[in-house]
Amino acid sequence: MTVWDDLVGQEKVAAQLDAAARDADALVTAVAAEAPLPEASKMTHAWLFTGPPGAGRNQAARAFAAALQCVSPDRALGGSPGCGFCDGCHTALVGTHADVTTVAAVGTQILAEDMRDTVRKSFTSPANGRWQVILVEDAERLNEKSANAVLKAVEEPAPRTVWLLCAPSIEDVLPTIRSRCRHLNLLTPSVDAVADMLVRREGIEPAVAAAVARATQGHVDRARRLATDPAARERRAAVLKLPLRVEDVGGALRAAQELVDAAAEDAKQLAEEMDGKETEELKAAMGAVQGGRMPRGTAGVMKDLEDKQKRRRTRTQRDSLDLALTDLTAFYRDVLALQLGSRVAIANADAEDALERIAHGTRPESTLRRIEAIAACREALDRNVAPLLAVEAMTMALRAG
């Protein structure tokens, strides 16, 4: 068991990161011993992880962060850093390591104020670990000001600071930033690789693992959630019934409302889990007295947290909607495959009756227009169009075909 084991179908990337982690470990060891530094190294101060949704770019970055912080004694005997069990690996993987800072968008953008303390920290030496690691999970959401702050930090990093940026594609990151990063591109893992992981790591029955891996087309996180969360399976089943419910105006509008309501409920459940814990932890850190009263001068801090949580709820609702739209796109892709007689494997085999009905009742041109309508809805949501308006426009277009 190593930190690389969760990188499904990414053997080449794992090998590159393992080699870099070895060189990084040799560099820190040489500095500590005041020995000559290695002449050549595969380690660098900034990395850019790209790949389609579900490929595991965030997981790859976090595994690398863990390997950089590994303190296993086996390293001194020639072993590779990244054991997965030592304190350095464990705390980095679960997100509690003092020298691994994770930045994720809580709204549609990563604001400059969200990056201010992180950029400042990047110029300091590691407190306890071997490296100061800054992991930006949504680098494509950096706005102009926050991206410029990151650029300055990446241009002139501290000697033992490493930036790990994650984005869907290299074009999603400013040219000035990506030119200073070593680029690693992850590919969508095969359906068989994802199914095998679910069986080995999650104990899922092989038939169920194969079905959810096929349904998500190699998206690791979504496959794991479908395999382990009955509510997620119910939401997906409801989405796959939507194409049969938009045959009239009333049905289209009701389907849109239910889709938006389901996304809002999903976001609410996640928020209740995260916000309560986050608020209590901040209150304790700020010295709340019995009864929950806060010390003087802390109202601004609590207000900032509430604003952050509100932005995160908005983003979570939009992400939940986007997931439903992804499932809907896959449904119509299967319809198109049936209409064209393609040999492409059907992803939504559990909705075969609905697929056959729509495939035989419409033409490929209509299916393509419906896929375009879903894409237009996703673009509208990215532009902050009100979710209900965007989804209603989509369901009316699905009805028209």
Image: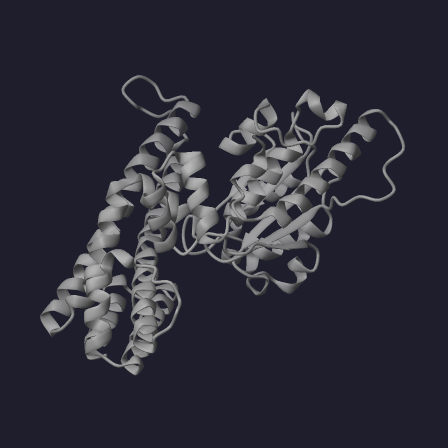
Give the left or right position of residue 132, taking residue 197 as reference: right
Residue that appears at 55% across and 62% down:
172
Q: Nearer the viewer, residue 68 or 296?
A: 68
Q: Is residue 355 visible?
A: yes
Q: Nearer the viewer, residue 282 or 60?
A: 60
Classify residue 345 by image quadrant: bottom left
Q: Position of residue 349 (x, y in %)?
A: 28, 58
Is residue 202 toward the left or the right of residue 43 in the image?
left
| Residue 361: image location, x then y, percent | 19, 77
The picture places residue 189, in percent across and down from the top left corner, at 50, 52
User: Which quadrant would the C terminus be assigned to in this image?
Assistant: bottom left
Q: State whether residue 164 is above or below residue 278.
A: below
Q: What is the quadrant of the N terminus in the image? A: top right
For the residue pair 167 and 228, the one nearer the viewer reads as 228
> Which residue appears farthest toward the right when viewing the image?
36
Question: In which image quadrant can residue 251 be found?
Answer: bottom left
Instruction: Tell me: 135 left or right of 360.
Output: right
Q: Residue furthest top?
A: 290
> Which residue is drawn at the image coordinates 33% and 52% (left, top)?
314
| Position in image of residue 280 (x %, y %) | 35, 27
Q: How many marks?
A: 0
Quarter location, residue 195? top left
* Residue appearing at x 19%, y 75% in the figure: 399
How is the structure coloured here?
Answer: one colour
Q: Which of the pair 192/369 is nearer the observer?
A: 192
- Residue 311 is at least partly visible in this image: no
